[in-house]
Each structure stands twice: as structure tokens, then as C-alpha cells.
Amino acid sequence: MPEQPETHWLTDREQRVWRTYLAATAGLQAHLDRRLRADAGIPVAYYEILVVLSESPGLTLRMGRLAELCRSSRSRLSHAVAMLESYGWVSRCATEDDGRGSLARLTDAGLAALREAAPGHVAEVRACLFDALSPQQLDALDGIVHTLRDAVAARSGGAVPGCQGAP
Amino acid sequence: MPEQPETHWLTDREQRVWRTYLAATAGLQAHLDRRLRADAGIPVAYYEILVVLSESPGLTLRMGRLAELCRSSRSRLSHAVAMLESYGWVSRCATEDDGRGSLARLTDAGLAALREAAPGHVAEVRACLFDALSPQQLDALDGIVHTLRDAVAARSGGAVPGCQGAP
DNA sequence: TACCTGTGGTTGATGCTTCAACAAGAACGC
DNA sequence: GCGTTCTTGTTGAAGCATCAACCACAGGTA
């Protein structure tokens, strides 16, 4: 590590925590993705889209709102929904009131795929995270993730990559 | 969410924690990546390679060992180092003892790039994570990330995607 | 030596994400 | 009404990760 006078470097402990944080979060994400692909042929990123749609009234949502709820860029969502549409899991149609808008709707096949994938996925999340943590650790994690999310949002202005802002 | 008798679904609280966890970790990663690219033109994934090399004796490491330390697949590392080599930040040469092996070495330009990128990156990590957490939360996070990493490793067999195992 | 197996590393194809540019419609001002 | 500007969503190109296949070499066995 380079040394510069004005920089407030991480302490040994912070560095250890940070690297373990990276290993743990990346490892969990990779593990869940691999399992979901193997079990149900769905990448995690697409799974989340199906979940959000399944919780929406009429299984339907505007693209923009769906992107918000998935913390995804419009671009990414557009590509992803095109893929999901080719699988037959989602269908798209125009909105009534707004000529620009597009509605994404979870199809029966999409709901079936989600119902099949969900138990294994949840079991994995539980086994890796919630079953491994003590009640005290869960309490702490609750506070930590909220703090972290807010701190990141404050620093990044809530920006989502791929969401083209002011030109 | 679908209901199936044998599945142990997440409680409301667990679900809330899990979704916030996803938002926080993904948000932090995206934020750090964006900052690092904007400030120094380095993707986070490549930054980590430079850091590991900079901490190695002689700024040199075998590809396989480097992949381990970066928790990266050989394939990914090979592509990444090829890119870093084209930037002039890393050079590759053959090993003396093993005709198969390859050594990656951090160049002066690579070290300079790292020295320029590190302060901003560390400041961001500090601002988003360590400065936002209370001492008690840091203690808790220390335990949580170690627990999580171990639980994931136990469940995934320590597998790294892209590391072709037994045929 | 010859063979066979395992390991280290690279390569090319494919897939998902991001960025930049664009098209089409809505909202506002005049 | 008409032009300007903002919003919504899509598209194509480029970047990085993953997967499968592959080559080259090492180590063991006969």
C-alpha cells in the first residue's frame, strides 16, 4: 500500500473487515447465481424482476417503475425484459393513458418458473445467511445494512448506473 | 411470493433485511466502481489485481496464486491481465522452474496508477462504510462477515465460477 | 522411451451490463 | 396552434465475466 500524508488509510482491522466483506458478499452473490442457474435456469438478476412483478397488482408494472424497484437502469431492464419475453415469462404491451409507456406483465409460465425456483433460492439464502447468524447478529445486520444503504445513497446521489441524467 | 408447505420462507423482517442487504451491497459496489473509473480509469475488478500484486514480494506472482488471492477464475484473470498488460500496468514472463507457469509483474506505471487511484478509493470506502458505522456496528460487522464468508464457503465448497473442476 | 494423467494457463464464443444515441410522445410556454 | 424541452423506452456497440475447449508441460508408470 502506498503512503501519502493526507490520506486517511484503513487500519489493519478495517482492512481485514473490508476484505472479508468483499469475499463474503461476492461469494454469496456468485453462489446464489450459480445455484439459481443450475436449479431453474434463471440468472439472479432476472429472478429479481420476476419477484417484483409477482408482487405487483395484476402482475403488471410500467417499465420505469419496475426499473426503480429493481434498482436497475432502464436500459438493462429493457434488455432483460426482452430476454424474459423470449422465454415466454413476461409479456409487454402499450399503456392506455401514456403513449410512450410500456407495461410488463408476468405470464402464467413466468409465475410457474418463479414458483419452481423460489424454494431452492430461499433455502440457500437462509442457509448461508440467516441460519448462520445469531439473533444478536441479525439485529446488528439489520441496522448495518440500513446505515450502509443510506450512506451510499447520500454519497452517490442515489444514482443508478445506466440511468442517463442531465445532458 | 408463492406458498409451499415444505418451504421455510423468510419472515417479514428477514425479507426486509435481505432486500436492504442487496440494495446496500450492490449500491456500494456500483458506487465504488463508478468512482474508480471516473477518477482513475480503472474498473474495481482490475484495481484489486493491482493491489494484490503490489503487496507481493518483488511485485510478482504466479497467475494461479494471483487468481486465488483475487478469488478469481484463471480464465477471468487471464483476460484481465491481458488487458492490464495492454495498459502497460502489468508485464508477463515465463517461470524459470515450471515450463507451464506464467509470472505477472506490476510495472512502474502500474504502481503509479495504483498510487494515484488508491486515496480516492479508500476515502470512498471509509465514507460509505467505516465512518457511517458506530464502533459497536463495526464489531458486529467483523463477526458477521467472517460468519457469512465461512457459511458460503461451506455451502459452495469454496467454488469459484469459471474454475473448471473435475471433468 | 512411450504413455497416460493431472495441472497451469490461454483462447474464443456467448451472455449480461453499461454507455451513448435515438425515437416518440407528453408537458410547458408563447 | 406551435416550438421547445423533458420524459419514457428502445437499440446497437463495447466492456467484462463465464463457460467450454484447448495446448503445453510436469509427474508418474511401465
Image (tube, coloured by chain):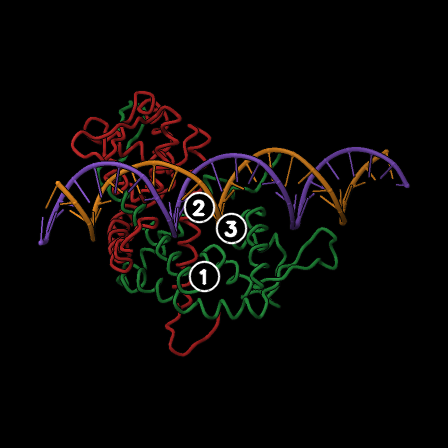
Chain colours: A red, B green, C purple, D orange
Label whose residue precedes the other's in the sequence (3 or 1): 1
**Secondary structure state at the residue bearing disc 2:** helix
- Residue at 52% x, 44% y is B160
For badge 1, the amino acid type reads Gly
For badge 2, the amino acid type reads Gly
Q: Mark 3 and 1 residues: CB-CB less than 8 Å, in contact?
A: no
Query: Which mark is nearer the camera, 3 or 1?
Result: 1
Q: Picture coordinates of residue D30 (x, y %)?
A: 86, 33
Q: Mark 2 and 3 residues: CB-CB less than 8 Å, in contact?
A: yes
- Residue at 42% x, 55% y is A20
For badge 3, the amino acid type reads Arg
The quadrant in which the N terminus of chain B is found is top left
Circle 3 sits on which residue? B71
Q: Residues within 10 Å of mark 3 (few under 14, many from 20)?
A: some
Circle 1 sits on which residue? B41
**Mark 3 and mark 1: Cα distance apart in space:** 22 Å
Give the letter of the chain under mark 3: B
In the displayed structure, does residue B109 sit left or right of residue C24? right
- Residue at 71% x, 51% y is B100
**Mark 2 and mark 3: Cα distance apart in space:** 9 Å
Give the letter of the chain under mark 2: A
- Looking at the rendering, which quadrant does residue A61 occupy? top left
Callouts 2 and 3 on one subunit: no
In the displayed structure, does residue C16 sit left or right of residue B111? left
Give the letter of the chain under mark 1: B
